[in-house]
Amino acid sequence: NGVLQNLCSHLLVFGECQESKCKKRHAFSENDKPRFLPTEGFIKFKLRGVSNPILYSIEITDHYSVKTKKWISYVEENNLIEQKLLELQEFMKIEENRINQDPLQIGDICAYFDSKDVKWCRCKIISKK
């Protein structure tokens, strides 16, 4: 049906799912592969937050590539991302810059206001109900 179902949380947490009628996804797809993050080798990181006992937020500081046998610094990339996020906040402060995207389509990149953190965030539409 073209809708990418969320991965099963039991699979992500425990490595397996024993619920026989689970409707969530139990296989990784190409969409799950991060585009801009290392997928091999080793990383050094800073712990930025703990959401719960199994969900952490980190900032990658360095990546060791087994292919190139070199450490790569992510500090410059992280600074660029921080700058872009600050630019998003400034851009979205101006009401004329906000466009109501209707109807939403799967795959759309949108912005929403997070009233808890009092900031604008980006998101990607992965399903419609």
Image (cartoon, helix red, strand yellow):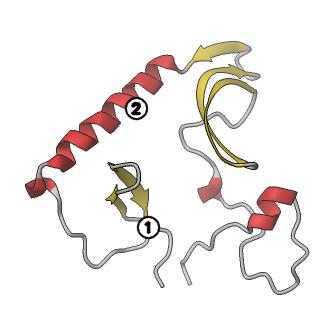
Relative to residue 66, is residue 117 depicted above or below?
below
The earlier-in-sequence mark between 1 and 2 is: 2
Q: Residue at x 45, y 18 (%)?
A: 76
How many numbered badges does the structure rendering display?
2
Element marked by disc 2: helix
Q: Do the residues under discs 1 and 2 have CB atoms within 8 angstroms? A: no
Direction from residue 51 to residue 89 in the image, left or right: left
Relative to residue 117, is residue 59 depicted above or below?
above
Front-most of 94 and 72?
94
Q: Which residue is mark 1?
A: 125
Specify the farthest residue to the front. Answer: 116
Q: Where in the figure is residue 56, as x and y percent of width and height?
A: 66, 42
Q: Where in the figure is residue 2, as x and y percent of width and height?
A: 54, 78
Direction from residue 101 to residue 59 in the image, left or right: right
Front-most of 109 and 97?
97
Q: Residue at x 64, y 33 (%)?
A: 38
Relative to residue 8, is residue 46 depicted above or below?
above
Front-most of 56 and 11?
56
Q: Which residue is mark 2?
A: 81
Look at label 2 and name its amino acid: Ile
Q: Residue at x 45, y 24 (%)?
A: 77
- Asked where in the image residue 114 lies, by quadrant, the reply is bottom left
Look at label 1 and name its amino acid: Ile
Would you call the spot at circle 1 few (<14 residues within 10 Å), some (14-19), or many (20 or more)?
A: some
- Asked where in the image residue 37 lies, by quadrant, the reply is top right
Direction from residue 78 to residue 90 in the image, left or right: left
Q: Name the quadrant of the N terminus.
A: bottom right
Q: Where in the figure is residue 22, as x and y percent of width and height?
A: 79, 81
